[in-house]
Image (cartoon, grey):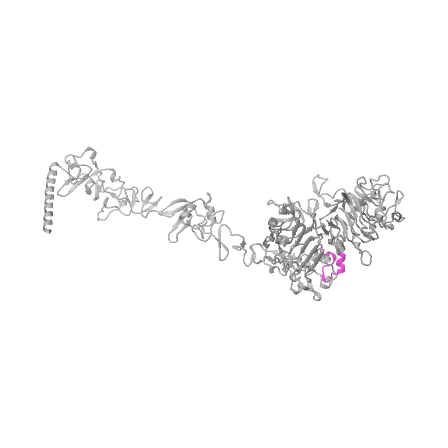
Amino acid sequence: MNTVSFCLVILIVFDLTKYGLSEHDKFKGRQFRKVLLKFHPKACRVYLKDCGKTFLSGFPLKYFQQHYGKCKFILGNLVLCDLKRLDNGSDPDLSFLEDIVEVSGYVYLSRNEVRTIPLKSLKVIRGVPSYRFDDVEGALVVTRNGRNSTYGLETIDLRSLVAIQNHNVVVKDNPLLCNFAATIHWNELFVNPAQQKYIPIRTNLSISQEGCNISQTYQSCDGQCPMFDGQSYCWGPGSELCQKMLKCRNNPQKYCVDGPASDQYCDEECLGGCENSPGNCRACKNAENAGKCVNQCPPEFIVNPVDSRTIRNKDFRYNFHDICVQRCPAPFLKSKTYCVIECDYTRETPVNDTCQACPPEGCPEHCTQESIFGRKGFAILDSPALRKFKSCVHFTGMIYVSEESFRGSRNVTDPIRDLNLLWNLRKLRAIVGSIYMDLRGAPPELTNLTFFENLQSLVLESRGASSGTVLQILNGKNVEMLGFRLLTHIDGPIFLENMTKLCYLDALKKMTLYRDRNVSTSEQCARRNAFCHSECLPQLGCWGPGANMCLHCCNLQAGTHCVSECTDQPGFYELPDESGVKPRALLHGIGDHGQPFCRTLPINGSQQNHLSDAMIRVSKLPAKQCGRCHEECAETCYGPGAHECKGKCKHFQHGDRCVMDCPIDTYVDSETNRCLPCNNSCIPLKIRRCSGPGDYFGLGGCTACWTVIHDSSTNQFHCITNDCPFKHYTESHKTLEFVRKQNILITTDSHAAASVQSEGGGMIRVCKPCHPFCSVCTANGTHESICHSCLHWWFRSECVESCPPTETYTVMSEDDEPVNATNIPGNFTEPDQAKRLSDDIQPTITTLSQKDKIQSQPKNKWYLASRDPSQRRCLLCHTECVQGCSGPGLDSCVKCRNYKIMINIEENKFICNSSCPDNQPRVFHGMCTTEAQYAELSGRSARDFRDRILIGISAAIIVV
């Protein structure tokens, strides 16, 4: 059996003070009932296919009373099955059917044994959709309404029926339905008689009209019933059951005012005729707006006749099937100008009962039975299906859980072994379809169904085989609560069975038609101390034991929790009223006469006894909402701002504000969770500037630095914002290579910054000390190409701590103190750039070769050279000198590099030269000599050499 049914109530928010009901102690149940009657249900949506199996046996009367009572318009099908007589033989009270005026689908009557079905007010059967019966499309299908030829349905009271808009009338096996078969002028009811027929289906075993005396039936209509072609037409005996004849006599395709006796046509928008005037239609062909028939509902926009611009139409109405309404009744949603059961989820999402365009990031996911289960005829929930449900927010179809879902079978090869998978259903907010759960195979850990905690709407719609329930749960022997904490709309009947531990059902029972078998009683739940939270409105119940499981709050509401004080729930504060004063007087507790009192139901206990559940649902006031603290407050607050938190912050504190993340120019103090400023030496970046207070590069310090200098005591590279300090030079490195080489611990932010070629990333400059002898340098070393200023002395092109004595000499001042080069005036050429001799030596060297001529020297006594007056240079010996010198000349050498030319043998004065002069061609032990000098010196040398040998031999002999 396929069923979707619900009563559509116009939702009206009204102020009780408008009705003189501001003081709760003066609020009487009688007064309230008068108010409630103003808002009775007008329409019901039913998706009932046919009678199906005998599911409704013993229960149909209450079932139909729930669905059809007070309904004027049936959106869907009117299906009545298995209506039985009472034990005393009389019919039960079926007066709940007498308000029905219109059925948009078909009327299906089957297996009924009451004498009369009183559809007294039904005017129109539109027949969309139709019911297919033996290959015939039926708008009115009446079959098997009788046990035998003496016991069965006798009359269908359709006294007001004036139009069957589409399809046929199909009847079969109705043994006592006599007038229905013989005294109805069907063409008067068919809108298109050429295409619509009355079709009695007869077979060899048919019992149609077996209990009827047809000749007597023809005469059974009351004398006041109108005659047509010599015959009276009626639905049964009695003047009130006469068939209405409303088509024009001269034009059967049209309706005339008050029927065939008139020749005044009804308006084109009338269906089934009109009364008293052409515009007073009995029913509407297209749409009804405020009791008038119109071609279409008033549009949302109209053209202003003054300036020819579109303006919003103050009379705009939504199209609710063929009714024009100001607002769409729940659970319908407003979609453009229509009321729909679901949005177009490819482009829209429901927001406050309105289908709105999805945000740029996309629509919440809408899943269908086909998208989850494929094209299986009967889909059982298993692990693969649950994985697909993970992101579903809206679902159209049936969720079917069976024993196989948990234990597996040939058809279910991957059953639910991990209960956590059921939480993939947690995102579901709306289901149009049904839920069936047989929990026989579920593990004992399944004690609640809170994985449906975000489900808000459950609307029955099933086009396949169905039990006719929107929610059916069986054999959950360990389930203690349902936990559907946000469910506010259930559309369809509910059935629970074999749930011996289940409590907290009052909310469910008060929302819809409820049946159970072998479920915990209220007494059993009370013994288990399974009560709703004290902050729940007791008259409406709850879904579980917590303050977040209430169907409605007794006092205040903080998010999903009901509270007596807003500060009872972390993250909330109490809003002041319009006067700016926080209300404290109207708290729940004990009211007059010792009865419980809630501010959301300002009626004392004795008055509540006069109210039905429906009256209580309408009379309850919305719970006052607590102000929500800023999302970064961990405890409570005194206002909505991030700077108004009281207590700890949820994440971090920056100044007086709670923040989700510290600003990028701060770091987090791990002990206090405060955001503290980075060191000024760290580079400002678009990512976090530092990971700690340090002024060094790396973990606990700066994310990136322009320039660093090494601290050997801590082995850290400190960031500096200016140039390298005195006596340092700069080296550039690829940051990541430098980090690896120096084994520096860095953060992921540092790694990211180092990977970027801008904002200080990519390269890093390192300050390194100059050589200890160097004060200004561009690299590490003493050569003048990289060392630009010496701390001590320049020696040739190198910086040295002191001048080497074997290659330099010292100038003495008048007081015999060494004189610095800076104290010697004048700019001098390098001494190794020229070969110079003093004036008093020059004349004695007249025989030197031309290439060895020694240039004359300046008359300055001291020969010093300096590249910069502020720098000191060593005074170099002549290049012909070795082992030092006493001055810059060739005559100041301690020893000669090449040849010694004696000037004064007695005084041992000589000069050094690269060659001997022509008059001293012979060389004896590096000294230039004449031939005579050489012979004398070599002979003397030979004798001395011989004497030394003889002395050595003699000494050896003596030793021996």
Residue 587, quarter of picture: bottom right
Most extreme residue toward the top is: 850
Nearer-the-camera pick, 134 or 302 = 134
Q: Position of residue 764 (x, y in %)?
A: 42, 45
Q: Position of residue 460 (x, y in %)?
A: 69, 50
Give the left or right position of residue 845, taking residue 337 as reference.
left
Nearer-the-camera pick, 113 or 73 = 113
Q: Overall secondary structure of the magenta stretch? A: helix
Most extreme residue toward the bottom is: 594
Q: Position of residue 541 (x, y in %)?
A: 68, 59
Q: Position of residue 746 (x, y in %)?
A: 45, 50
Q: How many marks?
A: 0
Residue 855 is one of the magenta-drawn residues: no
Nearer-the-camera pick, 677 or 780 = 780
Give the left or right position of residue 807, taking residue 264 as reference.
left
Residue 247 vs 399, above or below: the answer is above
- Is residue 165 shown to the viewer in this render? no
Residue 25 is one of the magenta-drawn residues: yes
Most extreme residue toward the front is: 204
- Is residue 891 shown to the viewer in this render? yes
Q: What range is drawn magenta here?
A: 14-35
Nearer-the-camera pick, 838 or 618 = 618
